[in-house]
Image: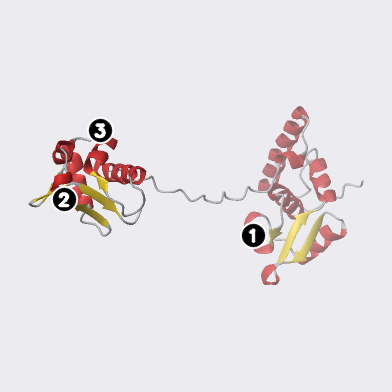
Amino acid sequence: MEHHPLTPSQSAVLFVLMSQARDVSNPELRTLAPELTRPSRQKLIDLGLIESAKGPRNSYVHSLTDRGWAWCARELDETPPKGAQPPIRALYAVMASIGRYLVADDLRLHEVFRPPASPPVPVPVAPPAAPIAPDDDVDRRIRAAYTHSARGPGAWVAMTTLRAALPDVEAAELDDALVRLQRRPGVSLIPQEDQMLLTDADRSAAVRVGTQLCHLFAIEDL
């Protein structure tokens, strides 16, 4: 394949397209390389080195062809174009160094120059769960003990049964939690109407709510 000599500006444009390894719009190309004039663009297209097409807002978008990549690879061994200014000569010195690196590691240009990675899509991170307050933990355990002991929602459970299900909760702590819970809708803590039915254990297990000793507990909505 013939290796066509190009002007310094045309060579720089090809090297920039190679470095980006993607479609580059005219406005973006102007910030990275010498201006790609219409005659230069047409010459590079005619030589099969680039592809150009109309993109968003009627602006041209350019990319290297396979022939363009091959041209860049061969140009790594070439001297700067005739009449090249110091910035272009410096560019060729850098590209020559890259060429030596490719040869030493048996690599190809496309293995070194790749499109910029897309920014990672942020993954929503759930806020850390608030630590369970001791009161909340006792409340949860009371509800679990009630659910296990009751025949169904709203059924009465004796305080002796509830205390037996929570042997590690101190009596005063359990009393406070039950008094707090019974203030909520659907939660009841009441005395046994027929005091003759109470055993000594029932009396000892009672929870005082105001002036009443309560022996039965229920939760209607589990």
Q: Residue at x 78, y 47 (%)?
A: 81
Of residue 208 and residue 49, the one placed in the foreground of this image is 208
Q: At label 1, which amino acid type do we have?
A: Glu
Q: Are marks 3 and 2 in contact (CB under 8 Å)?
A: no
Relative to 104, does residue 159 appear above or below in the rendering?
Answer: below
Q: What scheme was used to colour the molecule? A: secondary structure
Q: Residues within 10 Å of mark 1 (few under 14, many from 20)?
A: few
Relative to 220, does residue 167 appear above or below in the rendering?
Answer: above
Residue under circle 3?
167
Taking the image as drawn, is residue 166 in sight?
no
Q: Residues within 10 Å of mark 2 (few under 14, many from 20)?
A: few
Marks 3 and 2 sit apart, C-alpha to C-alpha, by 27 Å
Q: Quick one: label 1 or label 2, which is nearer the N terminus?
A: 1
Looking at the image, residue 42 sits to the left or right of residue 190; the answer is right
Foreground mark, 1 or 2, reads 2
Taking the image as drawn, is residue 125 in sight?
yes
Residue under circle 1?
28
Of residue 2 and residue 189, the one placed in the foreground of this image is 189
Of residue 164 and residue 11, the one placed in the foreground of this image is 164
Q: Which residue reaches farthest right?
A: 1
Residue under circle 2?
194
* Place of residue 220 in the rendered image (x, y in percent of width and height, measured from the top left): 31, 56
Judged from the image, the secondary structure of the residue bearing numbered disc 2 is loop
Q: At label 3, which amino acid type do we have?
A: Pro
Q: Residue at x 83, y 45 (%)?
A: 70
Q: At label 2, which amino acid type do we have?
A: Asp
Q: Which residue reaches farthest top?
A: 104
Judged from the image, the secondary structure of the residue bearing numbered disc 3 is loop
* Place of residue 106 in the rendered image (x, y in percent of width and height, measured from the top left): 78, 30
Q: Quadrant of residue 205?
A: top left
Q: Which residue reaches farthest left?
A: 211
* Place of residue 154 in the rendered image (x, y in percent of width and height, measured from the top left): 31, 55
